[in-house]
Amino acid sequence: MDLFPTLENKYSKESLSALEAQRQAEFIAWGPVVFQVSRIMLKWGILDMIRNSDDGITREDICAKTGYSDYAVKCLLEASLCIGILLVDVNTNKYSLSKTGWFLINDPATRVNIDFNHDVNYEGWFFLEESLRNSKPEGLKHFGNWPTIYEGLSQLPERAQKSWFAFDHFYSDSSFPEALKIIFDEHHVRSLYDVGGNTGKWALKCVEYNKNVEVMVLDLPQQIGLMEENIKGKEGAERIKGYGINLLDENVSFPKSENILDAIWMSQFLDCFSMPEITSILKRAKQAMTQETRIYIMETLWDRQRFETAAFCLTMTSLYFTAMANGNSKMYNTEDMQYCIEEAGLEIEQIHDHLGQGHSILVCKLK
């Protein structure tokens, strides 16, 4: 396994003492309640209240300001001390934030991940074992009887839907400015297929950034209808077309471009499929290519992360795909993605790393 240096240092040798390892094991055992206590401390505003105090705040003051019982506040504060999100002055009994508590409040990724896990995944995690055994998202039945979460997105409860899109957009949107420069300033793309274009957000960014580019969004027919509604009346919308296609149907080909096709764009798309499905999609994309066409695959490949925390989040996200999304996909590493690319008769020409929240772009050409 090839890992970026930071990850190799973390994952190839033991770094904890015996006592630290024992505590980590207990932290895992009590993980569900650790999560819920931390989430409630955020939701009830107690962490904000502590942060905004000049020199800390007592339990009595928290009770008075929140209206919650002394019992409830005491349970939360004591647990938060042991979790590591609070500190206490033993002389004044005033509580203050630890560094971890500060990140819970201020790190946007952490807040997005908390909402995503509570509103979308939490009850579904109970069926992770069945999902792994059956290669089906058994946890999804908590929301409805769809084969994958994608068919049910428009029918999810409002809060779950909001948290799902916030999670999805947070990680992709941060990479868009750098990705646009690669696509249009370095590679001078004039025509582009946006595969799995969803709401048309990337397509709109493209036509706004480049006044000449023509974009065709490829997605499920029902999604194309939503995309067309979303882009209506917006700048450059007349240069965006939709093409309804079931990308999992191996008998359905990519459309042939009327003009020279410069680019096929796949952003946070292939991680929604199993490796055989990825290979099939890429084989059909290849049929629409010429020697000049490039496929741009933007993914958060977990083995290419500069920071270990990012790799941790990505490998955990893989299990969302298992239990909730489709049961057979994940956040892939470079080796897996390269295998699919080469099986499809393509090769990687260039890799751009460290875009936004840890994205990479694999630039692929015909082999």
Image (cartoon, rainbow, N blue to C red):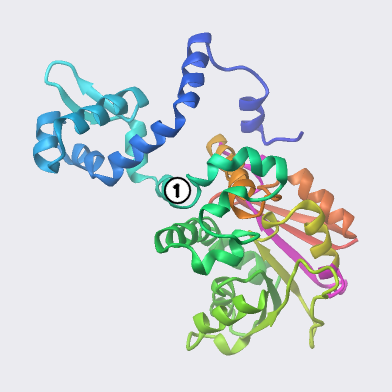
Residue 58 visible in image: no
Q: Is residue 363 above or below residue 188?
A: above
Alpha-carbon neighbours of circle 1 within 10 Å: few (<14), some, or many (≥20)?
some
In the current view of this chain or complex, which residue is farthest to the top? Answer: 18
Please provide percent x and percent y for residue 235. Answer: 50, 85
Tell me: 242 left or right of 335. Answer: left
Residue 302 inside the magenta-drawn segment: yes
Which residue sits at x=61%, y=17%? Answer: 14
68 and 109: which is toward the camera: 68
Image quadrant in which the C terminus is located: bottom right
Q: Amino acid at mark 1?
A: Ala
Question: Residue 348: which quarter of the image?
Answer: bottom right
Please provide percent x and percent y for residue 198. Answer: 59, 71
Name the secondary structure under disc 1.
helix
76 and 314: which is toward the camera: 76
Q: Which residues are magenta?
A: 284-307
Please provide percent x and percent y for residue 75. Answer: 25, 28
Q: Is residue 335 above or below residue 13?
A: below
Image quadrant in which the N terminus is located: top right
Q: Is residue 180 above or below residue 8?
A: below
Residue 245 inside the magenta-drawn segment: no
Residue 294 visible in image: yes
In this figure, which residue is indicated by the disc labeled 1? 109
Q: Is residue 355 above or below residue 62?
A: below
Which residue sits at x=61%, y=78%? Answer: 222
Count of residue discs: 1
Tell me: 170 left or right of 54. Answer: right
275 and 262: which is toward the camera: 275
Tell me: 250 left or right of 144. Answer: right
Which residue sits at x=29%, y=46%? Answer: 43
Please provide percent x and percent y for residue 241. Answer: 65, 85
